[in-house]
Amino acid sequence: MPTHTPAPDNGSTDNVTAVRLIPFIVGCALFMQMLDSSVVAMALPMMAETFNTSAVRMNIAITAYLISVAVFVPVSGWAADRFGAKLIFLLAIILFCLSSLGCSLAPDLDTFIISRFIQGLAGAMMVPVGRIIMLRTVPREQLLKATAFLSIPALLGPMIGPPLGGFIVTFTTWHWIFLINIPMGLLGIVLILKYVQEYKKEEPPRLDWIGFLLSGIAMATCVYGFESLAKNDGFFNAYFLLLISLISGLLYWFHAKRVSNPIIDLSLLKIPTFSISIVGGNLCRFAIGSTPFLLALLLQLGFNYSPLSAGLITFAGAFGAMAMKFVAIPLVKKFSFRKVLIVNAVITGLSIMACALFTPETPVWVMIVVLFFGGFVRSLEFTAVNTLSFSNIKPEKMSLASSFSATAQQVGISMGMGIATVSIDFSMRFNGSLSPSIMDIKSGFIIIGTASILSALWFYRLEKSAGSGMY
């Protein structure tokens, strides 16, 4: 049986404030994680100089973080049930801040890599457990509004990261890239202690160690495999890693059918709204990891824009994401989740493909308008799909559903980067070029946009009443 600490009256000021603040608290955690994932790349050359190594070797720090997140995300739901969601969320933010400080103060590369790995572990616990708290605190009818707020930092982080990283390394030192996490983390800690209630199961299941091992191998090799594709780190090595990931995933599937407490509960896929949201959402989620990457290549490599100028142009998408917050609920109320997801998936795909029409002569204001609109529709899609995925999940399954969803999202973002890179590489081979041309980069937009449009076929399978009562 799940247990709660005594809650104040529903009509009390504290409870109302908590309902309003918890999406903000979780949003801060999500923003820290997404920003940290994207801002570090800009500082790699300066870090390499500090640690007296090559920028290529410094990529190990990024890989260590991504692998750590991938390995430990599946265990986040079990940890929340076993030790308490509030405690795990609090410890995760504290650990994230301490590891950020460790990165900033690291005297050598080995210490830096260890700090990044610990930071990834904290990030793996931070966001899924924060989402569990939000799902259990925010009333069902307010969940769409809360998720709309939460989708903003998810899109802001990858867009703000590159220009912010460029600004920091230009005018200060790379150490501040990690120190900026600490004020946000401290604010989150204070708000958690004041407003978040504890929740844990009285008799939590034992940890599925075999499942943890198999899922960890599958996730680590999947993320590292797609990361290798994105870095052109040898296609044979990348495909070998992805093969190991596939084999480990199949072994986990057989294992999960035989145990009562699998670390990733595949029975959740029997819930139509959850399974459709996971598959369809991931086809759209390819855009999160790949679109900023493709835009950076197009604007900097293709159009010869400076990193700062390119970053400021792509930042238009962040404003579009924020604007969406004000229209998500009216749109879903008027047209339903099903219609919004189907139509908006097509529009999202077309908005991504529209970037392939950019040329060096395209006016900046035209690019800004297209990217603003693209940020708006992507944010709307993620808001709707992330809300719908939990619409039919029972309270006792909420922790497992959150960790499952976070695991799938991690795979989707990594796959987006890998697929975009593979499409560019194939285009280069077809054209016989040694370095990516503008047309090669544009092929990535076409492939990713097509994936988003195809997700409409999955959302078409939803019942017309899917998600009713969530707004």
Image: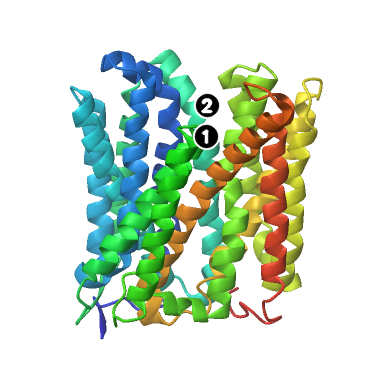
Is 140 displayed left or right of 452 in the figure?
left
Is 204 displayed left or right of 183 in the figure?
left
Secondary structure, mark 1, is helix
Which colour assignment does the render follow?
Answer: rainbow
Where residue 39 sits in the image (x, y, percent)?
A: 44, 32
Against 282, residue 437 (above or below) is above
The reply to whether residue 122 is visible in this rendering is yes
Task: Count the marks.
Answer: 2
Q: Nearer the viewer, residue 108 or 214?
A: 214
Write the residue at 52% across / 62% down.
146
Where residue 397 sits in the image (x, y, percent)?
A: 38, 78
Is 30 displayed left or right of 389 in the figure?
left
Is 80 displayed left or right of 364 in the figure?
left
Looking at the rendered structure, which numbered label has been put on residue 160?
1
Write the residue at 43% across / 59% down.
246
Q: Nearer the viewer, residue 391 or 219?
A: 219
The reply to whether residue 18 is visible in this rendering is no
Residues under labels 1 and 2: Cα distance?
A: 6 Å
Q: Nearer the viewer, residue 15 or 5?
A: 5
Q: Which residue corresponds to mark 2?
A: 163
Q: Quadrant of the N terminus?
A: bottom left
Where residue 30 sits in the image (x, y, percent)?
A: 42, 50
Judge the density around disc 2: few (<14), some (14-19), many (≥20) Cα neighbours within 10 Å.
Answer: many
Against 423, residue 310 (above or below) is above
Q: Are marks 1 and 2 in contact (CB under 8 Å)?
A: yes
Q: Callout 1, which amino acid? A: Ile
